[in-house]
Amino acid sequence: MASILLVDDDEVFRCVTARMLRSAGHTVKEACDGIQALQALEPAPPNIVVTDVLMPKCDGIELISHLKKSYPDVRILALSAKESLGSLGLLNLARVVGADATLAKSTVSDRLLSEVEALASRLL
């Protein structure tokens, strides 16, 4: 099973999602924003980072960019409740900066675990 860093500023969503991932046998660390996530990467990065796109302090786009530069082997699943901000497609932007997969939060209950399993199967 994979080690996962789950990053989301919505505490309820984070707790429910972490519980689901742990029930599937994964090891899960939690962070409430990108700054906490960056601190949680040491001493060893996880296999997978599941991150919200819109968060305070350091958003998911910044986090994904940092991960791709500093930890290129980490797989990234980006989530967002808002698919766009004005004309900016948030999930498309997440893919452009390096997310390996994206999901709208409205589909998370149906697809998150299968996306995590797919990313875990591609680990080096």
Image (cartoon, grey):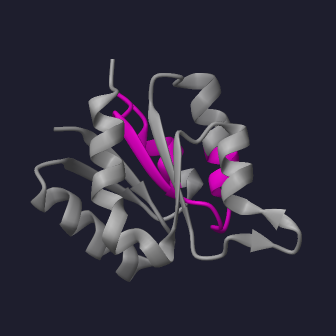
- Is residue 80 depicted above or below 10 in this figure? above
Give coordinates of residue 92: x percent, y percent.
71, 53
Membership of 41 in magenta stretch: yes
Residue drawn where x is 39% and y is 31% of the image: 45
Residue lying at the far top in this picture: please name it.
124
Residue shown at the point (60%, 29%) measured from the top left: 68
Quadrant of the image occupied by residue 80? bottom right
Q: Residue furthest right?
A: 87
In the image, 81: left or right of 76?
Answer: right
Residue 58 in sight? no
Q: Image point 73% across, 41% down: which residue?
A: 96
Position of the N terminus, as image quadrant, is top left
- State the residue lying farthest toward the bottom: 12
Residue 86 in the image: state x and y as whole percent. 87, 75
- Relative height, residue 31 to residue 48 (above, below): below
Q: Quadrant of residue 118?
A: top left
| Left or right of 52 on screen, residue 110 | left
Tell me the residue at 33%/73% (across/down). 109
Q: Which quarter of the figure is the C terminus placed in?
A: top left
Q: Which residues are magenta?
A: 36-63
Q: Position of residue 60 (x, y in %)?
A: 62, 54
